[in-house]
Amino acid sequence: MPVEPETEVLLSRTEIAAAIDRLAAEVRRDYLGKCPLLVGILKGSFVFMADLVRRLDFPLEIDFVRLSSYGPGTESSGQVRVVQGLRSPVRGREVLVIEDIVDTGLTDSYFLEYLRKRRPASLRLCSLLDKPARRRFPVKIDYLGFSIPDRFVVGYGLDLDEKYRNLSDVCVLVEG
Ligand code: PRP
């Protein structure tokens, strides 16, 4: 078995739970009685989505898309591919996009524009994490859990080479 890098907790499960309580209250205040469509961007958002929606005690719908950006090396090419698109109709709906992290902003600026063209009644973004130091494409985050420094984070849905998504805390990798 290859040795996996050690991790260190950046945001504990307790801090994450408190942030999601706050976010759920904000979302409830704005969407109660509107039956919003929550759209999670896979794969990273699946844990956050599951925890958030269980704190929302009013009718809503859930769907997912799977997006992938591609390009040489680790840098974004500026292009996003829709691997699995939306099944749910968007026109006239109150749409809330659920994201685990906004980094360069490429994925969300692309996807929000993709949705905007389909004429939702409203369109907002909720992200657990924001890494503002990395931003290249402007994105407005309407509901934000945490702003974090420019460190590579894993856990709570986020991966390194598909590993670590199952950690309950948001962690940083320890060098060496
Ligand atoms: C991550 C994350 C966001 C995106 C943010 O997804 O879930 O969707 O990157 O980065 P950006 O702001 O630079 O576009 P990733 O492409 O790693 O796929 P995954 O969710 O399947 O891990």
Image (cartoon, rainbow, N blue to C red):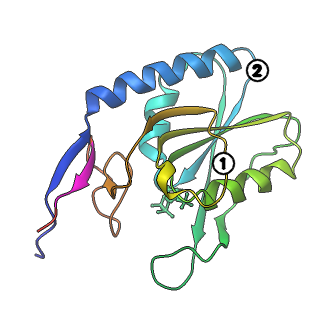
x and y percent of residue 73 in the render?
A: 46, 83
Lateral position of residue 2 relative to residue 146, left or right:
left
Q: Which residue is mark 2?
A: 34
- Marks 1/2: CA distance? 24 Å
Residue that lies at the very extreme toward the front in this rendered image: 133
The stretch drawn in magenta includes residue 108: no
Question: For the point 87% across and 50% down, which residue is it?
Answer: 118
Viewer-closest of 138 and 160 = 138
The stretch of residues the image draws in magenta is 170-174
Question: For the point 33% across and 55% down, which residue is it?
Answer: 151
Within the image, what quadrant is residue 4 found in? Answer: bottom left
Lateral position of residue 72 relative to residue 2, left or right:
right
Question: For the point 27% across and 57% down, which residue is it?
Answer: 164
Verify CB contact (< 8 Å) between mark 1 and mark 2: no
Q: Residues within 10 Å of mark 1 (few under 14, many from 20)?
A: some
Against 131, residue 12 (above or below) is: above
Principal SS element in the magenta part? strand
Viewer-closest of 69 and 10 = 10
x and y percent of residue 101 in the render?
A: 48, 49
Which label was assigned to residue 129?
Answer: none
The amino acid at mark 1 is Val
Q: Residues within 10 Å of mark 2 (few under 14, many from 20)?
A: few
Against 85, residue 3 (above or below) is: below
Q: Secondary structure at mark 1?
A: loop
| Number of numbered callouts drawn | 2
Check mark 1 vs ligand 1: CB closer than 8 Å? yes or no: yes
x and y percent of residue 137 in the render?
A: 65, 58
Lateral position of residue 95 relative to residue 17, left or right:
right
The amino acid at mark 2 is Lys
Against 151, residue 130 (above or below) is: above
